[in-house]
Image (cartoon, rainbow, N blue to C red):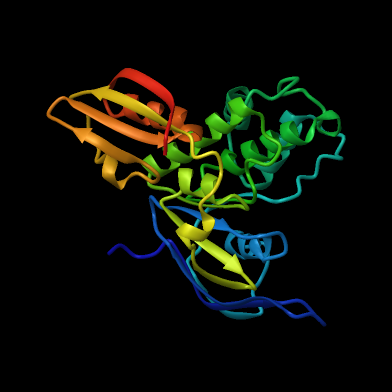
Amino acid sequence: MSKALLALRSVGKRYPGGEPVLSGIDLELRRGEVLGVIGTNGSGKSTLLRILAGVSEPSAGIIDGRPRVGYLPDRFPAATRMSAMAYLRHLGRISGLSEIDGRAAGLLTRLALAGGPGAPLRQLSKGNAQKVGLAQALLAEPELLVLDEPWSGLDKDTHGVLGEILAEARERDLSVVFTDHRAEVARAHATRVLRLSGGVLGPADEHRDSGGSGERARILLRGPGSGDWRTEPGLVVVADGDDRCELTVPAERCDAVLLLALRRGWSVLSVRTPVAK
């Protein structure tokens, strides 16, 4: 097994005068892994992500590894007078990046930022400010992408784009950690899902966490194409022949799977949604 990109050993966090927020966290993150962490508000998800991103120090335990990190915090500083492009350019220069403008503009275009790169941050809606936050997390081409509630406030089309970005990150052998309070969203996009409860990180209970609409899409592909679909999170391989493959996937992940199929050399014969789970 390959060496972990980042590992937490018995990590804890306690703020002065308060109860422990995190206790005895053991976690290994490997390249090509997309980890979804679910939990209620106040469970410590944001604290855990700040430690993973290196912006907060644990009160106890050991952290092994220093990957290049892209971090989307739970609160984005949208009150600044800067435009979206000026903000990304400023952060890129702080990080020592070159040729910032082209990459920043490309990310903002892909995320369909309202008003474009010149839009003032203080005039953006929560969802559009979130798009700028995603762009800054991706700007430095990180090895580890840490996203705190990344779907919060995003429109439906951008949900699909974010799903594509996570699939691409996995294809490029990056490591991703994201949080969400909805188990169905985590399971649709993650290769592994853990639950944080009472400051303790452990396996998610699939029976307990089942919910949501349960809508799934059925995708029929024609090959030859590459890749083992059985290793993809949230997918069910209905049929797998010499030149055809039929999949069922969570409806919200349909666009990301279609993009991945095309990149792997498959042709899409049909897409039907929804089908019974």
The reply, left or right, for residue 34 in relation to residue 54 is left
Residue 15 position (above or below residue 108): below
Residue 252 seen anywhere in this rendered image of the structure: yes
* Residue 7 percent across, percent down from the top left: 47, 69
Q: Quadrant of residue 106?
A: top right
* Residue 95 percent across, percent down from the top left: 63, 47
Q: Quadrant of the N terminus?
A: bottom left
Q: Residue furthest left?
A: 242
Q: Quadrant of residue 80?
A: top right
The reply, left or right, for residue 88 in relation to residue 78 is left
Number of numbered discs present? 0
Residue appearing at x 51%, y 63% in the figure: 66
* Residue 178 percent across, percent down from the top left: 56, 51
Q: State the residue in front, 20 or 85.
A: 20
Q: State the residue in front, 213 or 79.
A: 213
Q: Quadrant of the C terminus?
A: top left
Q: State the residue in front, 91 or 13.
A: 13
The reply, left or right, for residue 85 in relation to residue 9 is right
Q: Residue furthest front?
A: 276
Residue 172 position (above or below residue 57): above
Residue 266 seen anywhere in this rendered image of the structure: no
Residue appearing at x 72%, y 64% in the figure: 42
Residue 37 position (above or below residue 151): below
Residue appearing at x 51%, y 34% in the figure: 252
* Residue 180 percent across, percent down from the top left: 61, 51
